[in-house]
Image: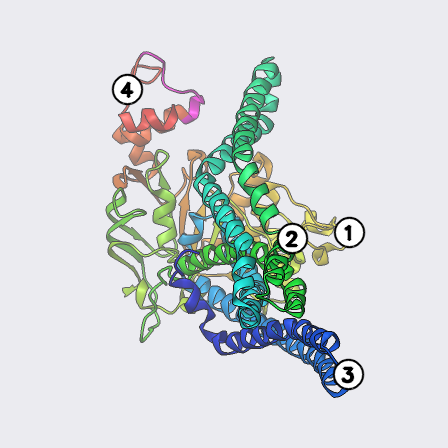
Amino acid sequence: MAAEPAALPSLLQPVRGRLALAVLCRAVAALLDIAPFVAVAELARVLLADGPVDRDRAWTATALAAACLLMRLLFLVAAGVVGHLAENDLQLSVRRRLVTRLDRVPLGWFSGRGGGAVKKAVQDDVHALHHLVAHSLLELTAAVTVPLSTLAYLFLVDWRLALITMIPLALGIALFGRTGAAFKKNLPALDAAMTDINGAAVEFVQGIAVVKTFGRTRRAHRRYTDAADRFAAFFRGWVDSLAAPRALSEIALSAPTMLFTVLLGGTALVTAGRTAPADLVPFALLAVGITTPVLTISFAEEEVRAAKAAADRIGEVLATPELPLPAHPVTAGPGAVTFEAVGFSHDGGHRVLDGVDLTLEPGTTTALVGPSGAGKSTLASLLPRFRDPDEGTIRIGGTDLRDLAPEEIHRRMSFVFQDVRLLRDTVRANLLLARPDATGEQLEDAARRARIHDRITRLPRGYDSVVGEDARFSGGEAQRLSIARAMLADAPVLVLDEATAYADPESEAAVQDALSQLTRGRTLLVVAHRLSTVKDADLIVVLDGGRVVERGTHAELLALRGTYAGMWRAHERGTAWRPGAPGRSADGDTVPPAVEEAVR
């Protein structure tokens, strides 16, 4: 097996003592597994001996076999109970560590990972440790202890016949090792083949509507079948190359082969006068059980390897840097929100934001616009501290955001995103996340202002309907629920990242009116792609390449005849720049390259 990675012993540390006790109990139980067979062999010696039968010795052997069976059961139960209790505590310990770490990592960390990746670490990978602690290690202990102790006893009985017995065992292990080496060598090729066929299948299923529309079904189907044929050819060749050594190893390790070897070698030794006939009995009873654990070891080894890989993935999550918390948090006073020379990079190389200076005055609406990839959403995510800037400082009322406790940040800020997440809980519970102590009147008032109250009352159980069961919302309705939640929070700073993207024109106008009421006396930061939703903002900031290239009101930016003006003209016409005339709009005005790219 491969060397144990550092993550696994660290995860097992809290249960290492109990795990060692479970392994010890299983080892004792494994020794007691062969004790009855030894007793039977000794009983055979008594019964086959010349002269009168030694009754006391015969009954002693019988009683010893019965006692060993009872003690084996007790140690086996003890190993299982201790192992499962240790495994249960291990899962609890690891899951608590994972949840604690995930609670402290920057929220921006989750945006680069799907929910499936987090679920895999918290559930699937932790479950893989269950098999290791509760089953695999105990099975490996038995699989190693039984053959070693059996061989030790057989060597004491007759070392010559024991050596003969080891011939098929050594041959089977060598052949099995060759098969395992070939299997591991071809695993990368198998992964590549599986990736090829899975990709072709997903592409075929996801693109079926397109290929049917253009009458290319047969060509798309051929691409999938070609991938399937390639995989079948690879797999057939791989299996054929493993079939012979695998079959030979199983034949060599089979019980009939071992019994034939024992009888053949034993007969030769007995006829030569080198072994007593009674000495064949323990070999006939025990030798056939030596080879069975070899297959058990191979299966358990795969589970151990899977557990090690799972531990590595869990270790990567536990090693995720936490969001630094202030040693002595302070409370921010009233005042503007300022970005001072803010710079940020996701990967440490490409700079998403570079030297951004921006002031959000209290009670005003500031809109961020610009081409895709300009850094608008990234800049907005820094304000609720989903991430920390690599350079510069963000202040609220003159206080560095990093000096505020998370609770203080959540109290002072609320946010609504384009991609809304609703819990599988009642509508009421989803809204109360923002303010658990809100009254029913306050809850309904926020829903009315977000123009979602009427939709909720039409549900089977109204506000007590469960999302995903008897309450299903469209994208626009989910956004209005999120807006109602933000209204209920009543925070002085509000961040909206394309919050009305899925709203229909009628409800969008109503929500915009509600948001206008909400912004009175508050600071609002809006990320928008549709310029019509922010043309009345107090300040419009144009980002391009992570830098602020223009700022001002709608009228001021139009007068500049720059990036924003070109974007607005394209927005009004609903058309892109004319092909073949890069840098010019339909009326011949010069258009900056960034604008051309944004509206193309």
Name the kind of residue labelled 2 in the image: Phe
Give the camera-side residue of 434 and 366. 434
User: Is the residue 44 above or below the residue 135 in the image?
Assistant: below
User: Is the residue 114 above or below the residue 396 in the image?
Assistant: above
Give the camera-side residue of 521 and 133. 133
Distance (Cα) linking label 4 and label 2: 88 Å
Distance (Cα) linking label 1 and label 4: 55 Å
Quadrant of the image occupied by residue 384:
bottom left
Upstream in the sequence, badge 4 or badge 3?
A: 3
Name the kind of residue labelled 4 in the image: Gly
- Residue span colored magenta: 571-580
Residue that numbered label 2 is attached to: 260
Quadrant of the image occupied by residue 329:
bottom left
User: Which mark's residue is nearer the viewer, 2 or 3?
Assistant: 3
Upstream in the sequence, badge 2 or badge 3?
A: 3
Upstream in the sequence, badge 4 or badge 2?
A: 2
